[in-house]
Amino acid sequence: MNETLTSALVEMREDDVLAAVGAAKAAGMAATDIIADLQAGMKTIGDKYEAGEYFLSELIMSAEIFKRALAELGLDQSAADTGARGTVVLGTVHTDIHDIGKNIVASVLSANGFRVVDLGVDVPVEKFVAAVKEHSAQVVGLSCLLTTAFPAMQETIEALAAAGLRDKVTVVIGGGPVSDDLAEQLGADGAGASAQEAVNLAAKAVEGGAA
């Protein structure tokens, strides 16, 4: 492992991260190995978030540095978004168009090795069902900011059940007003109060353990 690169990311030293990426690339290190070192840093950042040492701002900043490091390699997010840890279908449910939280979750999931199929906002139930089928997703993330979108979340979960997919996917809800109690009420498997919690829930779903 390139500890210099990993530690630079953990410490949010963007210039040092980009320099280390450039040096590793010049030395002939495989892009996949460089990405793995970056993802190791993202995991440590997630651990620090869980321990209360880092906050949401650090999660967002690290995801942005991660993207810039990929650009330094001449790659985009798809290079890391390999699905090595599983596939997550993500979207803001219909009747809601808020996407800031969803976009943060998508970036952090990708940086942690998940393939993310981001359906956008105001997503109809049929689109979630079709995406799960098309991409053989293991996890579905339903986002909302408006309490009036709760029925749309429930409709989406019911549509997955009607399509015979409910027992094949873990459904996680997210957004400002959601809670574990709401998840239970709607028939979801959990609620992610933060981007890191979404990563942990996705990891538990596909790997049976923590991220």
Image (tube, helix red, strand yellow):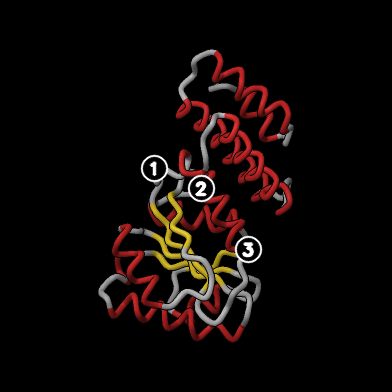
- Label located before the other in sequence (1 or 3): 1
Q: CA distance from mark 1 to mark 3?
A: 23 Å
Residue at 57 percent across and 33 percent down: it is: 38
Position of 97 with respect to 86 (left or right) is right
Most extreme residue toward the front is 74
Place of residue 8 in the rendered image (x, y in percent of width and height, measured from the top left): 69, 29
Position of 209 with respect to 67 (left or right) is left
Which amino acid type is shown beneath numbered disc 3?
A: Gly
Asked which secondary structure carries label 2, the reply is helix
Q: Residues within 10 Å of mark 3 (few under 14, many from 20)?
A: some
Q: To which residue does mark 2 refer?
A: 110
Place of residue 39 in the rendered image (x, y in percent of width and height, measured from the top left): 54, 37
Asked which secondary structure carries label 3, the reply is helix
Residue at 39 percent across and 53 percent down: it is: 87
**Is the residue under label 2 in contact with that under label 3 (CB below 8 Å)?**
no
Position of 125 with respect to 178 (left or right) is left
Say which mark, if any, is on residue 84: 1
Say which mark, if any, is on residue 101: 3
Work out whether residue 206 or residue 96 is closer to the camera in this orientation and state it: 96
Which amino acid type is shown beneath numbered disc 1?
A: Ala
Which amino acid type is shown beneath numbered disc 2?
A: Ser
Asked if residue 145 is positioned above or below residue 198 in the image, the reply reads: below
Q: Residues within 10 Å of mark 1 (few under 14, many from 20)?
A: few
Place of residue 200 in the rendered image (x, y in percent of width and height, measured from the top left): 52, 53
